[in-house]
Every structure is written in C-alpha cells, then in structure tokens.
Image (spheres, rainbow, N blue to C red):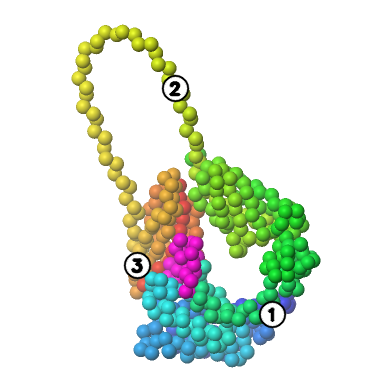
Amino acid sequence: MLAANPDVLIFVQGIQDNPVCSGTLSHWWGGNLEPFECYPLDIPADKVVLSPHVYGPDVFVQPYFNASDFPNNMPDIWESHFGYLTDLGYSVVIGEFGGRYGHGGDPRDKVLQDALIAYMDAKGMTDFFYWSWNPNSGDTGGILQDDWKSVWQDKVDLLGRLMDGAGEEPGDETQCSDGLDNDGDGLTDYPDDPGCSSADGDDETDSQPGGGDVLAVTVNINDDWGSGYCAQVKVTNNGTNVSDWKVTFTVDGVIRDLWNAVFVQTGNSVTAEGVSWNNTVNPSASVDFGFCADRTSTPPTPVPTPVPTPVPTPVPTPVPTPAPTPVPTPVPTPAPTPTPTGGLTTEVRINDDWKTGYCADVTVENTSSGNVDWVVKFDIQGRVRNMWNATYNQTGSEVRAEGVSWNNIVRSGSSVNFGFCALR
C-alpha cells in the first residue's frame, strides 16, 4: 500500500485472544494489541495508527466490571491492552467505543465511559470513533435519541471533553480564511472564492444563484404495486463548482420513507437535501437517495341526481322486513410469534404501518450460555422489499435471516438488531 501511495495512514485493529503474548484479562473483539510487543508490524511508525475496540457492560459484562474496585481498576487494564503503545510513540485511535450511558442498559456503563474518557484524555488519545450516531444499535443506543432527531446532550458533552481546545489547533480556522481550497474549485479563501462573503465564513462552497451550480434531478420508479411505489433519485451536478445540494421535485402521492437525505413535502412538491456523508456533490458527479410513497387520489366531485316528478303509485302490500344477516366480527391477525432457534429468541416489532405495507425492527437475543453465529426464522405478513443489517431469503411467509460481518456473532445474554420493510 505504501509503495502505491506513501501518503496514506494504515489503521490496524487489535485481535481478541492469542495463545502467546497476551495477558489473561478478557479482551474485546478487536481490543487486544498486546501481541504487537512480540510481533511488531512491518509498517513505519509514522504511517501506522493502532485502533483497538473497547466497550462497557452494556455490550458484555467482562469479569473486571464486577471487581470491588471498579472503575479504578480499568486504567491498568486499558494500559496493558493497548495504552502502553502511546508511550512507545505510536498513534492510538480508539476505533469503537460507546454504550447507552445510563439511558437504559447497565447503570455501570456511564461510570465506565466517564473513566475511559478521563483515561484517553490523560494519555493524549483524543482522536476517536464512537459507536454510534444512529439510535437503533441494540446494545449501545446512539448519540441520537429514539426520535432520530434529538441528541443525548450528555453524550455530546462527554465526547466534548476530548475535543476541548480543538478550535486552537492549526487548520481549524473558518474555511474562508484557512488557506485551503475546501470546495475544490481552484479558488481559496475570501475574497478570491465567490463562495465566501467574508473572511469569517465557514463554508467555501459556491452554492449561490449564478455561482455555477447546475443540478439535475431524475426520479426512476424501480418498484410499483399500484397503490404505492419505491423510487431512486439521482442528483447530478452539471456545474463547475462543488455543490452543497438541495433540490425540489414532484411526486405522485405521499412519501412514507426516504433514505440518504432529509426532506419536506408540501402537496406534491418535495424538497430534499443531503446528509452528513453525501451533502456535497462534485462537478460532473452525482449522488443518489431513495424513497417509497403511497399514491393518493382526489375523490370525484359528486354530480346532483335529478329529482323526477312524482307519479302516483298504488300502495304496495306490506312485505315483512327480513332480519339483518349477522356480520362476523373481524379477527385480528396475530403478531408473529417469537421463534426460538438454538438458544435464540426472535422478536419482530412493527414501527411503521401504512396498511399496504410496513417496516419493522427485529431483535435476536441469545439466551444460551455461549456465543452464537446467529441464523433465525420467523413468519411475516406479505413479502420483504428490503432488509438492513442482515441477509435473508423468503419462502412463502417464512423469512430466514442471518448476520453480516459486523454483527454475525451474538454473545451470551446479549442481542443484535436488524430491520426490514415489507408489502402486504
């Protein structure tokens, strides 16, 4: 890799266990860097970033979480697992850590995270990746609350302890005075870059009217079942500048679900814009997002029926009125029954139902005494249209799902989550 590009940094995760060169204290998957001391990597020290994983009791209760001196025992454990490498001059960036932080789960998780942040700060390990932003990670929750809009401010404040003083670091000036061509248009800072209205501006992107951004929107329906449909939207930048994109287009019906963008719908008009990972589109490039919608129709205006001139008619012989035919009471369709599979229980919870279809979350819990490479089966109404965080096949009403590379193992006493949308 370095021969092909000498400027890259190579991130190396830890392992879990090793028969030699590892201590007896339990390690996380990806959390053990102790073998590095016996088997150094053949990568220059200034090109390698060591990136262990470390979690708390919300993910799994390690034996040392039950110690009488918890959490004061944790710094020595972290030091032996990975922290010692910073003293040898290596860059250590925690590749995964996080938990519910007292919002449900194990109350010790908050204590653990507070201690870990203090340890990282003291060791100078202030770069990190936190799990996770989205709230539907079953054992950790997210920085976002369950409404997918509000943040857990205490988590933000916690991580802010590692970022204190970040504004004083070189390169953290506003985009319009940092000496960098942030939007790749060949122009740098105020007043040379027309995206900057002043030197204090923090967005160099020239997305003003007449600034060279020409966005084209195409909507392609890829699944249509009459009363609704799903579509893919492509936003193409035909201009000369990087665009922080925002587009408006029309739809047939009401959007029920939209991904990879945020949107507002007024009537048939939809305005959508990018999210953090796709909010900019380069010249001659495009970004995609998708949505599903229910079609709606306006009921026809009733036409008055002409009133005929009354004609005298003979009085009919009374006919006995038959008794009304009893209407059977509807029997609700039962929710899918959790199916145990090898110590696993499967719970399906519908969280969005629009009659012709629905979306659901699935929790797979391991009630056995060992870790399980999980595969589950459960019955659903209708047919799966898309599924995330699992692979699947469907036969009739039965769905067989199994984990993917990042969640295929569910620990004893823990659970994993995935989700799907289906049409009835």
Q: Is residue 28 visible?
A: no
**Residue range (magenta):** 134-155
Q: In front here: 6 or 57? A: 57
> Quadrant of the rendered structure where residue 4 is?
bottom right
> Is residue 419 shown left or right of residue 266?
left
Identified by mark 3, the residue type is Gly
Q: Decide: is 402 above or below 97.
A: above
**Sequence-earlier tag: 1 or 2:** 1
Q: In front here: 21 or 313? A: 313
Q: Main secondary structure of the magenta part?
A: loop
Identified by mark 1, the residue type is Pro
Report the mark closest to the observer, 1 or 3: 1
Secondary structure at numbered mark 1: loop
Q: In front here: 46 or 127? A: 127
Residue matched to label 3: 343
How far is disc 3 from disc 2 in space, using C-alphas?
66 Å
Q: Please give the name of the residue rendered at 45% of the width and 87% of the height, measured from the top-left corner.
A: 74
Q: Please give the name of the residue rendered at 34% of the width and 53% of the height, measured from the top-left corner.
A: 335
Image coords of residue 282 (percent x, y) = 71, 60
> Quadrant of the rendered structure where residue 260 is?
bottom right
Residue 304's disc number: 2
**Sequence-earlier tag: 3 or 2:** 2
Image coords of residue 353 (percent x, y) = 42, 50
Image coords of residue 317 (percent x, y) = 21, 12
Residue matched to label 1: 170
Give the class, few, some or many, for how many residues have Cα within 10 Å of label 3's Cα (few <14, many ≥20): some
Report the mark closest to the observer, 3 or 2: 2
Q: Please give the name of the residue rendered at 53% of the width and 84% of the height, measured from the top-left corner.
A: 120
How far is disc 1 from disc 2 in space, using C-alphas?
76 Å
Report the mark closest to the observer, 1 or 2: 2
Secondary structure at numbered mark 3: loop
Magenta stretch holds residue 369: no
